[in-house]
Amino acid sequence: MKALPLAVVSAAIGAAAGVALAYWSVGPSPTSFTPFASAAGGTSQAAPVAFPEVQVDQSTYDFGVMQRGAKETHDFIFKNVGSGPLSLKVGETSCKCTLGEVSDRPLEPGESTPVKLEWTAKTVEGPFRQVATILTNDPRQPRVELSVEGRVAEAVGLEPPDFALGSFAAGQAKEATVIFATFDQPELKATAEMVDTSPNREKYQVEVTPLDLKDVPLEGAKAGVKISLKTDGKLPLGFINDWVLLKTNVPKSESLQIPIFGVVEGDVSIRGFHWNKQSNVLLLGTVRAAEGISSKLLLSTKGEHADDIAFEVGKVDPPELKVSLGERKAIRPGVSHVPLTVEIPPGTKPMIRNHSAQGEDGVIELKSNHPVTPTMTLNVRFTVVP
């Protein structure tokens, strides 16, 4: 049985009307997946048709309180209670959040299969609701929405709650530490490494060191470890948003992801109306799908490489973002500008990419011939509504 990836759609709850509109407008896109069975033709009377009928044990599951960085999964059970084969297919999604599995083999009458939803609580404290859409060939229920919900709380036993690297110069190595403690068991086992999805995995070194109880700064702790993070001085320019995966023998904290924050500064900087220098993020706000938006920025380069700097666009997520570069213009010796345009074209489907439980930031990667910082990342936040 083959499994297909299932990206989870994020639904806005108790948020602004624009965000809610973005979620509710996301529906199945035109697809070759036909939700109706074919009836046999006849001149006098149509032959009986065997229709599938989908039944789900529950459409919503409450994870309760999740520690920030923790991962939870739940299996929704799909059953065919009809008389014809039931097909399931992943529906269109509006953001990149989590993964699950769905069988691509039709279910015969009476058969069941699990559909797994998985979510890692990478957001700040507060409520969340994640929704996934499954398309079926049940003519009475061609679309099934599954949701997981709950509340994110700061991880228990982490001090501080993240690796804060601050702002630092390109080429500079940085270090940060986090203490993890347990309050209910005297023996703590822990390992740590960068998450598999980190684009800069090889640029970090992570080490776990057991601590004497007297050196654990958390009151009531029974055991603790120090997690040390070091960079190699080769991180790309821009905002850092990476994660360390911590595995322990502590119940409810067997797997935690600890965020890394910081900003790498160098010879290349960004200017523009929508660019927020303090957070190092391009803030496009709420965009109407019919109108789109275009943001014109400048890549400003200074120093000995400014006169021959050349850029190219690397990876762009989501691909709906259109990114283009203009011709380099020499302002004066040692200073040059390159126009950069980031566009959400009219007609873009509704989506939420606003650094929240409803959707992570969009990311643009720029490459250059700069010998110290050959890559640069731009985080983009926006919501597309109908």
Image: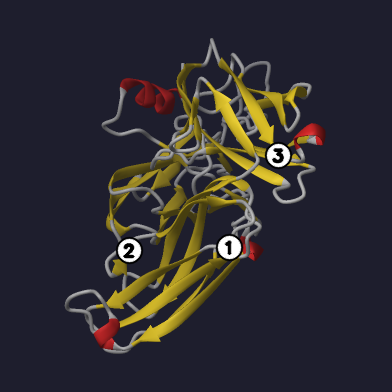
Q: Which residue is mark 2?
A: 160
Q: Which residue is mark 1?
A: 173
Which residue is located at x 48 percent, y 51 percent?
A: 262
Q: Position of residue 91 (x, y in %)?
A: 55, 36
Q: Give the quarter of the image for residue 187.
A: bottom left
* Residue 258 seen in this snapshot: yes
The mark closer to the camera, 1 or 3, is 3
Q: Which residue is mark 3?
A: 303
The mark closer to the camera, 1 or 2, is 1
Sequence-first disc among 3 and 2: 2
Q: Is residue 99 left or right of residue 325?
A: left
The kind of residue on which mark 3 rests is Gly
Sequence-first disc among 1 and 2: 2
| Distance (Cα) linking label 3 and label 2 | 37 Å
Label 1 crowding class (10 Å Cα cut-off): few <14, some 14-19, many 20+? some
**Camera-nearest residue between 81 and 161:** 161
* Residue 117 seen in this snapshot: no
Q: Give the quarter of the image for residue 35.
A: top right
The kind of residue on which mark 2 rests is Pro
